[in-house]
Image (cartoon, rainbow, N blue to C red):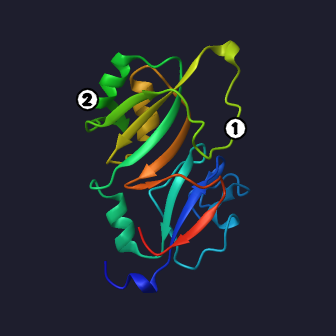
Amino acid sequence: MDNLKQHQHFILHKPYGYLSQFIYEGKRRTSKKKLGELYSFPKGTMAIGRLDEASEGLLFLTTNGKVSEYIRSKKIEKEYYVQVDGVITARAIEQLKQGVSIGINGEKYTTKPCKAKQIDSVEHLPIAVRHVRDERHGPKSWASITITEGKFRQVRKMTAAVGFPTLRLVRVRIDKTYLKITPGTVVEVDGF
């Protein structure tokens, strides 16, 4: 990467309820929370691989478009912990690993094979305790899904395709960088 020193790079733990952008271009509500409310980022800063408003976790930001392109490439793994509706089965995990059919822009798309496993706990993560729903509505469980592609709402669509809709989604790793900071925390780094 050329001239990295003139660019700035950040790691952020995006909290639930924030858009992964700095200005809101929608026509409805303008009171949505944006990344610029968390930190005074320099002009030209961009989020690398967005997380939707209902998702949380690790987000890289940079002023260098070449770095952004590289991180978003299929060379880099992104790992997500997903809390799903129901107790996810070994069969569903195997289906996720093999690739599932989802809709992208009105077309059927089969996801690439990925890494997936059931996990018991997320207590080791610096994530906020957030009420998702009462236990009286049935059990919940967690799974880890690691992908290299990044289609619109892909992980949510993947879990729904195997019968376990996502209740909560947290990106916990990008390449070799793990989520270690609390929600809303921004750290400037030398590079990724």
Task: Report the amino acid beneath label 1.
Answer: Val
- Circle 1 sits in a helix, a strand or a loop, which is it? loop
Classify the position of the C terminus by image quarter: bottom left
Please report whichever mark, 1 or 2, sits nearer to the chain's N-terminal start. 2
Q: CA distance from mark 1 to mark 2?
A: 32 Å
Residue 31 x %, y %:
74, 56
Q: Which residue is mark 2?
A: 98
Q: Which residue is mark 1?
A: 129
Q: Which residue is at 64% across, 51% downward?
A: 15
Q: Give the camera-side residue of 117 and 45.
A: 117
Residue 128 x %, y %:
68, 43
Residue 105 x %, y %:
37, 42
Q: Is residue 11 above or below residue 136?
A: below
Q: Give the camera-side residue of 186 and 74.
A: 186
Task: Report the amino acid beneath label 2.
Answer: Gln
Image side of residue 125 versus residue 128, left or right: left
Q: Which residue is at 57% across, 79% downward?
A: 43
Which image quadrant is residue 140 in?
top right
Which image quadrant is residue 154 in?
top left
- Circle 2 sits in a helix, a strand or a loop, which is it? helix
Residue at the farthest right position: 31
Q: Which residue is at 31% across, 24% downward?
A: 95
Residue 177 x %, y %:
44, 56
Q: Give the camera-side residue of 115 and 65.
A: 115
Which image quadrant is residue 64 in?
bottom left
Nearer mark to the viewer, of 1 and 2: 1
Q: Which residue is at 37% across, 20% downward?
A: 92
